[in-house]
Image (cartoon, rainbow, N blue to C red):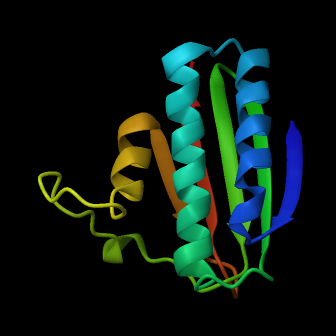
Amino acid sequence: MLQLSFKSDAKYLRIIRASVKSFLEISGYKGKDAMMIVLAVDEAICNIIRHGYNERTDGIINFEMSESEGKLYFRLRDYGKKSDPKDFKSRKLDNVRPGGLGVFLMQKIMDEIDYDTSNSTGTLLTMVKKK
C-alpha cells in the first residue's frame, strides 16, 4: 500500500501521476493500460480540486493505492463539498471542447467506482481495476 497526502493544488498532479505510474509498473501494468489508469486518477483529482474544493488550493486530499486479490484499489478522500453521483452529467461526446468528460473516462477505464459521502464532510472515492 502507498499513501500520499497533498493539497488541492494542480501543481502536485505531476508528482501524483508519476507515483501512480510507478505503482502500476510494480503491479505489472505498462503501456496503454497504465496510461489509461493514470488518466482516470488524474481526472478524479481534477474533479476534486474543481468541484469539491471549488479551485481552492488549501484543501487536503488523501490518496491511497493498494493491490489485493487481483484488484488494484485507488482511494481519494477529500474534505470539501460532498459529491452526489446523481448530479454528475458528462457532456455529449460530439461536443468537442475541453472538460466535462472526467467521470465518463473514469467509468470507461475502471471496473468499479464508489462514492462514499457518509462522513460529515467530503467524499471518499474508491476506484477499482481488476487485473
What's the residue at 87%, 60% (across, down)?
Answer: 5
Relative to 129, is 26 above or below? above
20 lies above or below 83: above
Q: Is residue 122 left or right of residue 11?
A: left
Q: Residue at x 75, y 80 (%)?
A: 57
Q: Is residue 116 visible?
A: no
Quarter the N terminus occupies: top right
110, above or below 42, in the image:
above
In the orientation shown, which residue stands out farthest toward the left?
94
Work out whether 79 lies above or below 20: below
Q: Is residue 104 left or right of residue 17?
A: left
Q: How many marks?
A: 0
From the viewer's side, name the closer residue of 53 and 96: 96
Q: Position of residue 126 (x, y in %)?
A: 61, 52
In depth, the one of 63 and 93 nearer the eye is 93
Residue at x-position 56% and y-position 15%: 31
Quarter of the figure with the C terminus: top right
Asked where in the image residue 80 lies, by quadrant, the reply is bottom right
In this rendering, would 122 be left or right of 88? right
Instruction: Work out whether residue 112 can be spotted.
Output: yes
Q: Quadrant of residue 7?
A: bottom right
Residue 68 is situated, as x and y percent measured from the top left of the image, at 73, 27
Residue pictured at 70% horizontal, 41% vertical: 17
Residue 104 in the image, given as x and y percentages of width and height: 33, 51
